[in-house]
């Protein structure tokens, strides 16, 4: 009998579900195996008010059908949000997501400066109300240095707002890992693909468009730092796939869209990775326990049973090409039990 592994209430704390036809096409890929996810708000136009949050959540619930899955909703951060507005929307959201203006997909309306005093009213209200701040941390500098350059901004905000939970999203550098130890209110999500690849995998030979993402994959020593904290399930890190679907024609094109689609294979490949490093006992905290504690959420009860049985990844899921398309991975999903 093949080796089996049970994962209880897995969570994806950084997920793009898009909208419209794309939402309908890919939402179940996450909702089938995950109990819940932090949903990114960078739609066109972005999600910026209570009515839009409620409407978007409704569209997600319709798209996932009978799956047991909790979408933890977010607002697209604006420094104009006042306390009264945040109080009015607090029960509908789990966090706010801050994007530097123009730094990634659909982020043109993001923050163009990080003056503490300009941000203070909104961030103080968030701190008082217990609303976490998720940040895509990159500057407009040289692409390989953008995240490392942003660490000083993380530290400035963490110092100015010590009671505010700040989530460094999809970290990719040794410098970001080191920042975790410097401030008690800094936390981080780590993707599957950044635990596996470096820039060499993306562009070292023939260009691999389906591995191109933002933040871009970095150097071997950066991947090593990420692996060290993920594999020991450091209490301040949690899994966030940053699974970001784009149509095949938008990836295999001049002006390749940024994003790696990992939702359908994330749990299976994480199990393989943690097993390889003799760390399967720490996978539950990385994939669930830490996130529940950091965010204070209780997701729907779900057991995902993985089986050590080879699985060939489909070439596409409704027109979206996943990571490892056409390749064989070690684990398959045997069954999902709800309740």
Image: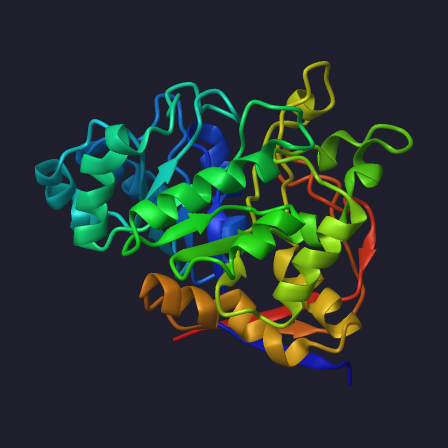
State which quadrant residue 326 falls in: top right
Q: Residue furthest left?
A: 84
Q: Residue at x 74, y 74 (%)?
A: 275
Quadrant position of the N terminus in the picture: bottom right
Left or right, residue 291 beside residue 214: left
Residue closer to the observer: 282 or 234? 234
**Residue 19 in the image, given as x and y percentages of width and height:** 42, 31
**Residue 128 in the image, given as x and y percentages of width and height:** 17, 52
Left or right, residue 276 beside residue 77: right
Can residue 54 be seen from the camera position used here? no
Q: Residue at x 72, y 50 (%)?
A: 222
Q: Is residue 338 above or below residue 126?
A: below
Q: Is residue 153 above or below residue 267?
A: above
Q: Is residue 146 above or below residue 339?
A: above
Quadrant position of the C terminus in the picture: bottom left
Q: Residue at x 30, y 43 (%)?
A: 57
**Residue 119 in the image, given as x and y percentages of width and height:** 27, 33
**Residue 260 in the image, given as x and y percentages of width and height:** 65, 39
Residue closer to the observer: 46 or 226? 226
Residue closer to the observer: 287 or 335? 287
Q: Residue furthest bottom?
A: 1
């Amino acid at each position: 009998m093949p080796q089996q592994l049970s994962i209880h209430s897995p969570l994806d704390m950084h997920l793009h579900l898009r909208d419209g036809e794309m939402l309908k096409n890919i939402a179940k890929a996450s909702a089938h195996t995950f109990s819940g996810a932090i949903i990114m708000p960078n739609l066109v136009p972005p999600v910026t008010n209570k009515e839009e949050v409620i409407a978007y959540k409704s569209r997600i619930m319709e798209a996932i059908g009978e799956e047991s899955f909790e979408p933890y909703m977010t607002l697209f951060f604006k420094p104009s949000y006042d306390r009264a507005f945040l109080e009015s929307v607090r029960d509908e959201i789990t966090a706010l997501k801050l994007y530097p203006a123009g730094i990634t997909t659909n982020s043109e309306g993001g923050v163009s400066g990080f003056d503490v005093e300009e941000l203070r009213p909104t961030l103080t209200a968030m701190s008082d109300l217990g609303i976490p701040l998720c940040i895509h941390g990159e500057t407009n500098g040289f692409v390989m240095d953008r995240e490392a350059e942003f660490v000083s901004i993380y530290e400035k905000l963490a110092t100015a707002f010590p009671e505010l939970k700040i989530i460094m999203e999809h970290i990719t550098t040794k410098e970001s890992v080191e920042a975790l130890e410097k401030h008690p209110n800094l936390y981080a999500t780590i993707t599957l693909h950044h635990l596996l690849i470096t820039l060499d995998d993306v562009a070292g030979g023939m260009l691999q468009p389906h591995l191109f993402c933002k933040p871009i994959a970095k150097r071997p020593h950066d991947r090593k730092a990420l692996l060290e904290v993920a594999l020991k399930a450091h209490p301040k890190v949690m899994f966030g796939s940053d699974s970001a679907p784009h149509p095949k024609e938008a990836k295999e094109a001049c002006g390749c869209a940024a994003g790696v689609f990992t939702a359908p294979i994330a749990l299976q490949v994480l199990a393989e990775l943690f097993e390889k490093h003799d760390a399967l006992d720490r996978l539950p905290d990385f994939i669930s326990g830490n996130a529940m504690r950091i965010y204070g959420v209780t997701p729907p009860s779900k057991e995902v049973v993985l089986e050590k049985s080879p699985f060939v990844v489909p070439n596409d899921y409704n027109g979206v090409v996943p990571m490892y398309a056409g390749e064989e991975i070690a684990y398959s999903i045997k069954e999902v039990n709800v309740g």
